[in-house]
Image (cartoon, helix red, strand yellow):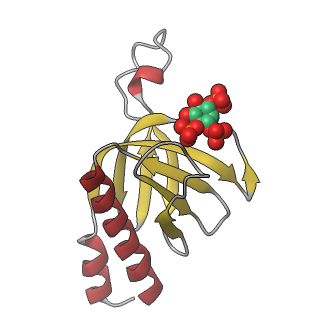
Amino acid sequence: SSPEMHSQLSSLEKAGILNKTKVSENGKKVRKNWGQSWTVLHGGVLTFHKDPKSAPSSNSNKSNQILTEFTVDLRGATIGLAGKEKSSKKNVIELKSQNGSEYLIQYDTESIISDWHKVIYDTIRQLQEQ
Ligand code: I3S
């Protein structure tokens, strides 16, 4: 990949709080477990961090650490708005990775979801050109 492609991808960065759940793994449906995540897009990879509130409180040393919950390689991924059959929540995006994992991403504020949709979509397209 050319240096121009690299610089275009490195401009596709974003971070913020989203609600998310995994819905399938390796093509197999898994039970939803909605939770808030500090979410970071960097280098064509989307990382969902664990909600610190869900960390074991007994482990006070580690409870302030930001731990990864899932990473999604956006190369070969697809994104779309989720239909009503996927969730009763509003503003839901579905994201499918090339390796057969599927996630729902949601936030009540529509502009937040449309900004994430755009940057993830642009990243997927950028990765296809490399
Ligand atoms: O697609 P589902 O199974 O209706 O998803 C709901 C469930 O995951 C539910 O938890 P239980 O597995 O304990 O029933 C969650 O509380 C709901 O939030 C899920 O549906 P939504 O429509 O919120 O994605």
User: Seen from this angle, which residue lies furthest top?
Assistant: 58
Which residue is found at the position 47% from the left and 34% from the top?
35
Residue 122 in the figure: left or right of residue 22: left
User: Seen from this angle, which residue lies furthest right?
Assistant: 28
Q: With respect to residue 65, does 106 lie above or below?
A: below
Viewer can see residue 33 = no
Viewer can see residue 26 = yes
Q: How many marks?
A: 0
Q: In which quadrant is the C terminus drawn?
A: bottom left
Ligand 1 image position (quadrant): top right
Q: In which quadrant is the N terminus drawn?
A: bottom left
Which residue is found at the position 44% from the left and 46% from the top?
48
- Name which quarter of the figure residue 46 lies in: bottom left
Q: Nearer the viewer, residue 74 or 21?
A: 21
Residue 83 in the figure: left or right of residue 62: right
Instruction: Name the spot of residue 69 as percent of width and height, x first.
Output: 51, 40
Q: Nearer the viewer, residue 82 or 52?
A: 82
Residue 115 in the figure: left or right of residue 74: left
Q: With respect to residue 102, does 33 lie above or below?
A: above
Q: Nearer the viewer, residue 30 or 7?
A: 30
Which residue is found at the position 52% from the left and 58% from the top?
82
Residue 71 in the figure: left or right of residue 25: left
Instruction: Name the spot of residue 66 as percent of width and height, x first.
Output: 37, 34
Which residue is found at the position 74% from the left and 59% from the top?
27
Instruction: Name the spot of residue 91 as percent of width and height, x first.
Output: 40, 51
